[in-house]
Image (spheres, rainbow, N blue to C red):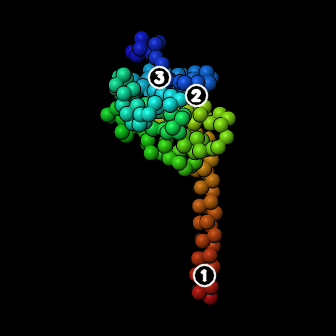
Amino acid sequence: MFIGVVANANYILINDGIITDKVSSKVESLGTELFVKTGIGVYVALPSSLDNKTIMLYEKELAKTLKAPYVLLTLAKAEEQVDIVFSKGLENSFDKDAVLSPFPWSGTIIPILAVKKENDKYNAATLNGYADIVEQIAKSKDIILDGAIGNTNRDIYHYLKLGIYGFLLIIFGRYFYKKVRNKSE
């Protein structure tokens, strides 16, 4: 159905040496699989600089070249800015605020970029953010992606939070049980 378009697909629109070939190929693989299964294109722009433009103006100009439905993740290295824009109709397909959240238990890009060491943070932030967007869209369309990578950080925080709340519930339960038992005696 979409095979002719996919053969020439390039989901990384701009990469000014920000991410490696290995990450690029994983992004392309995830993007192709999602497009084939849903018809939605998820693109990445990784300019080294926005050249004195706002990130929103930069994205607006780039989005003019994209065919709807699309999602565009932009990460500008020099300005240390990241944003996501999307075409109409995708508002309920993924949670932009969660993807861009600065909190490690929900955000998949900014917590990684906040790390001071330069090492591979752009590779990790791009791959995690892109995979999160693609997987959320697939889930909203009831599609299973063969190449999905999941989100280990979010899962760990989720189980840790469940454990802490469970522990607190047990402590409060025992406290109130003893209080009620002491009153009845």
First along the sequence among labels 3 and 1: 3
First along the sequence among labels 1 and 2: 2
Name which residue lies at 54% across and 34% down.
77
Toward which corner of the image does residue 146 lie, by quadrant?
top right
Name which residue lies at 63% across and 47% down.
156
Question: Disc 1 and disc 2: Cα gap in Å?
Answer: 60 Å
| Residues under numbered marks 3 and 2 in contact, where contact means CB atoms less than 8 Å apart | no
Name which residue lies at 67% across and 35% down.
119
Q: Dot 3 surroundings within 10 Å: few (below 14), some, or many (20 or more)?
A: some
Q: Which residue is mark 1?
A: 179
Q: Is residue 129 left or right of residue 2?
A: right
The amino acid marked with disc number 2 is: Ile
Q: Secondary structure at mark 1?
A: helix
Quadrant assignment for the N terminus? top left
Where's residue 96, x and y in %? 44, 41
Q: Which mark is residue 18?
A: 2
Q: Which residue is mark 3?
A: 13
Question: Disc 3 and disc 2: Cα gap in Å?
Answer: 12 Å
Where's residue 39, x and y in %? 39, 23
Q: Is residue 93 left or right of residue 130?
A: left
Q: Dot 2 surroundings within 10 Å: few (below 14), some, or many (20 or more)?
A: some
Q: Dot 1 surroundings within 10 Å: few (below 14), some, or many (20 or more)?
A: few
Where's residue 174, x and y in %? 63, 73
Nearer to us: label 3 or label 1: 3
The amino acid marked with disc number 3 is: Leu
